Image (tube, rainbow, N blue to C red):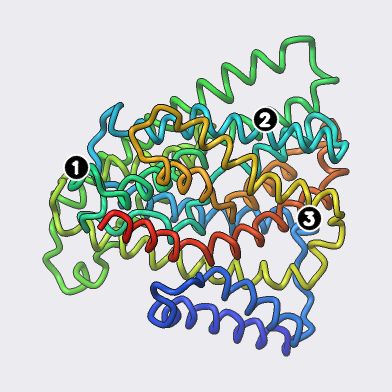
Amino acid sequence: MAASYYVALIVVSLAILGAAVLPRVFNDKPISLPMIYVVSGAALFFVAGMDVPHPVDHPELTERITELVVIIALMGAGLKLDRPFDWSAWSSTWRLLAITMPLSIAGTALLGWWVLGAQVATAVLMGAVIAPTDPVLAADVQTGPPAEGTDEEIDPEKQEGTIRFALTSEAGLNDGLAFPFTNLAIALAGAASLAAGEWAREWVLVDVLYKILVGVVVGYLVGQLIARFVFGEPASTRLAVVMEGAEALAATLLAYGAAELVNSYGFIAVFVAALVLRHYEWEHGYYEHLHDFAVMTERLLMAGILVLFGGTLVGGLLDSLTLPMIGVGLLILFVVRPIAGIIGLLGHSAHWDERAVIATFGIRGIGSFYYLAHALNEATFKEQELLVAAEELWAIVGFIVVTSTFVHGIAASPVMDWLDKRRT
């Protein structure tokens, strides 16, 4: 027992060291940090022979640790966005949310039901879990720090701004908007025990309207509160200077906790709070401190989670994976999402090569782990259908995430460099 504890300390230390050092080594190379963490985790746990907690056996732990890294990533994503609020300027975001995301969920659910023979509720859950673009692993195709000059507010024709803004804003919002569909799957699984139409009415009024609207309101209020505190009380002591940027973590936890207490969507509240905070003092240099603190915290947590994920891969996460599930997973990544993305961006002002990159780089990651763990934690005996399929769901989601991590991780830098050269 003691030996396992000390090995765990070594694993954590290596993950933190990697998060600090590896970005200097692999900058602008066709390899991503998530890839390294996953491989390192698999190798470390395989060599050490340690037992890795399986997410099916520890759903509560899985939900909480993935929840934490996602909400911090959402804060970082919101602080990156330098574009003023405007319907037309955010048109790529609305298209990806209103068209691409539902199409991706529907296409995934159809494949799950038709090819894998899943029950309707299980198929819908699979679609909801896999649909969101991950705000954690998609960092290589997101915008840079605040006011860095990579967004279209500075150059409307700059392709990097078009692509990076679309993927960053999509990842920030669809991680919250996947919740109604996750709750829809849970409602469908337990619908047999509900009065006719009752579950649908409750889903629309509560899970869609109330929770989204209240999440936005809570995020706005928290963003305003933190912004007034941050910019109304400048750092004047040595300790205050040392703690610069920590308000980003405070805003994250406050927005999430407050939203969840009133039974709304904390993910939406966090991202909205970040946007409100970012737009409070547009050109203030303190945003760099807020952004950097959020990103540092996110990177450290991400490293630890992905090392554990690598361990689960050698510990049996994919044991239930079948050839049809592999085929469906590849179709979701390389057919369903790209086609849904292209359809969503039809008529958009972006060039076709830009639309293709946006449609293709819908990276799947830690957010999918959170949603699946959350849904299985919420399921009771009434939703037994979801619990029965837990092993298979974790297997296909794990396969999709590891495939996305490697394929998109290898392709991100070369693709963005190629597009940069085409524009020069």
Whether residue 15 appears in this view of the structure is: yes
Residue occupied by mark 3: 395
Between residues 201 and 42, which one lies in front from this camera angle?
Answer: 42
Q: Nearer the viewer, mark 3 or mark 1?
A: 3
Quarter of the rendering occupied by the C terminus: bottom left
Which is nearer the N-term, disc 2 or disc 1?
Answer: 2
Q: In this view, does 241 lie above or below 223?
A: below
Quarter of the rendering occupied by the N terminus: bottom right
**Left or right relative to 277: residue 282:** left
Residue occupied by mark 1: 280
Q: Is residue 219 above or below residue 29?
A: above
Between residues 339 and 276, which one lies in front from this camera angle?
Answer: 339
User: Could you tell me the amino acid type at mark 1?
Assistant: Tyr
Residue drawn at point x = 26 percent, y = 54 percent: 150
Per the image, label 1 sits on a secondary structure element best described as loop
User: Could you tell me the amino acid type at mark 2?
Assistant: Ala
User: Label 2 vs label 1: CA separation?
Assistant: 38 Å
User: Could you tell me the amino acid type at mark 3?
Assistant: Ala
Residue occupied by mark 2: 106
**Left or right relative to 349: residue 48:** right
User: Label 3 vs label 2: CA separation?
Assistant: 20 Å
Which is nearer the N-term, disc 3 or disc 2?
Answer: 2
Indicate the position of residue 81 as horizontal and vertical percent values: 30, 47
Question: How many circles with numbers are drawn on the protein?
Answer: 3
Residue drawn at point x = 54 percent, y = 78 percent: 15
Residue drawn at point x = 85 percent, y = 44 percent: 389
Whether residue 257 appears in this view of the structure is: no
Q: Check the image and name the residue furthest to the top.
A: 196
Per the image, label 2 sits on a secondary structure element best described as helix
**Left or right relative to 381: residue 98:** left
